[in-house]
Amino acid sequence: MSTWLTLGRGFVLGVVAFSMVGVITAAFVLLERKVSARIQMRVGPTRTGPHGLLQTIADLVKLVMKEDVRPEFADPVAFRLGPMLTAVPAVLSFVVIPFGAPLVMRDLNVGIVYFLAVPGMTVVGLLLAGWASYDNYSFLGGLRSSAQFISYEIPRTLAVVTVVMLAGSLNTVDLLEAQKTVPYILLLPLSFAIYMITTLAEVNRVPFDIPEAESELVAGYHTEYSGFRWSLFFLAEYGALFAAAAFATLLFLGGGNGPVLPAVVWFVGKTLVVVFVFMWVRWTLPRFRADQLMRLAWKVFLPASLVNLVLAALVMMAVGR
Amino acid sequence: MMASDVLFVVFGVIAAACALYGVLTRYLLRSIVALGAFLTAVAGEFYLLAADFVAMVQIFVYVGGIVVLMLFALMLSTSGERQPLAGSDRRGLSALLAYALGGMLVWASVGAKFPAVLDRLPASVPYLGRALLGEQLFAFEFLGVILLAAVVTALALVRSERL
């Protein structure tokens, strides 16, 4: 009997994670439009609902009702598989986010490795989508995204390694416990900087959004997609954005630790601040060129993160922990 | 049957089906994607066998790294070509190699004494770290040297082609 209960619980949690990503995407699209509008001295959507709050819901209805177009020469299997393989890892990364001490779907012993590993599967989806579309823009977008992801993955992981060394655990709940007194942003500021910048690259946001640079690639890997399949890419993008911000909160900002208010409020509040910073950067900075992007990854961030790792290890040895 | 037993069988079936498809299909791209699915299913088996760290590293390195690199290489080399592969003209040799390797694996797994599956280990990472930097240090370093040699060789090959 408990077999079916366990499996059913897993299924329900999956549905919850998917719905969460859906709601977060709807909210973030609106937030992004409002933030971008304010930064550019506009007002953003105002007509649909009070202060334009229902704009994304209306957009969503429109998207679902749109015709699903598939280019004539597109590979039928890969074309369908691409958006799914892009969206699912973004949803999967929600499994290990500890919203408050008991509010975590699955408290893995290796939650941090899980978070580094699972979103990496997104690239397979992007590559497939770009290749299947049979279109030069999509193809280039897919290739660029994978090259970028692999390059920035290394300094990002090395930055997270310093956090793991300091906490002495790969478990997300233990990590929060270790940051009870001092959040790691104060102890490891360089790791935080490297994590934030490389994360911008990993979630394909300006100034690192070369894979979907409008001025040169139309829309990159999702050029040929429309309707619901296209919205799956959006789901993946904003789901990954929230997950990355949540992990910045978890790794460096002390997660749900904070006075008075319950842990969930602190956690979501800090995460939203990080998300706002990501959006702020996106609408303030121009885009890098593809070669600048690669040079930055291999010649600046990789050495910087290695030096950071060695420094952190030396300091920890000197302090004696 | 426990839930983990059900999932173990499910992951096993997925892994076997994906492996077969990956070998049988004539489309290189589909075969690589099937390999990715196979590796993910094997990661699921690792997790159910209480090797959670190995499961995560399996996804991290193999799905996120190796499969992506394979796709990348495929797309850079035959970007315009989508035809199915022609059959190999060295079938005999391939079959011999495959059967020899398969036979070795079967022989090794029949002869081996597997320890009983424990309940969840408290944390496998410390054990793994000590083993890699302790008793297995030589093998660990040796693998590093082999990988370095592979990288240098690849660079040398590319360079000689350009000259």
Image: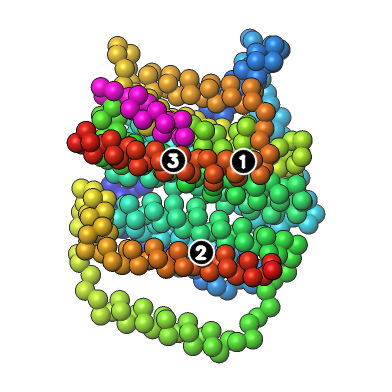
Looking at the image, which is closer to me, A50 or A223? Answer: A223
Q: Is residue A61 left or right of residue B13?
A: right
Subunit that carries the residue with mark 1: A
Quarter of the image with the N terminus of chain B is bottom left
Residue at 60% in and 45% down: A294
The vertical placement of B109 against B151, above or below, is: below
The three-letter code of the residue at mark 1 reads Leu
Q: Position of residue A35 (x, y in %)?
A: 62, 17
The vertical placement of A91 against B82, above or below, is: above
Q: Where is residue A250 in the image (x, y as percent from the top left)?
A: 37, 30
Q: How crowded is mark 3: few (under 14 residues within 10 Å), some or many (20 or more)?
A: many
Q: Give the range drawn in magenta.
A: A180-195
Question: Do marks 3 and 1 share a subunit?
Answer: yes
Residue A11 visible to an observer of this rendering:
no
Does the magenta segment cover residue A74?
no
What secondary structure prevails in the magenta region?
A: helix
Residue at 55% in and 73% down: B23
The three-letter code of the residue at mark 2 reads Val
Subunit that carries the residue with mark 2: B
Quarter holding residue B91:
bottom right
Disc 3 target residue:
A305
Looking at the image, which is closer to me, A208 or B112? Answer: A208
Q: How crowded is mark 1: few (under 14 residues within 10 Å), some or many (20 or more)?
A: some
Question: Do marks 1 and 2 share a subunit?
Answer: no
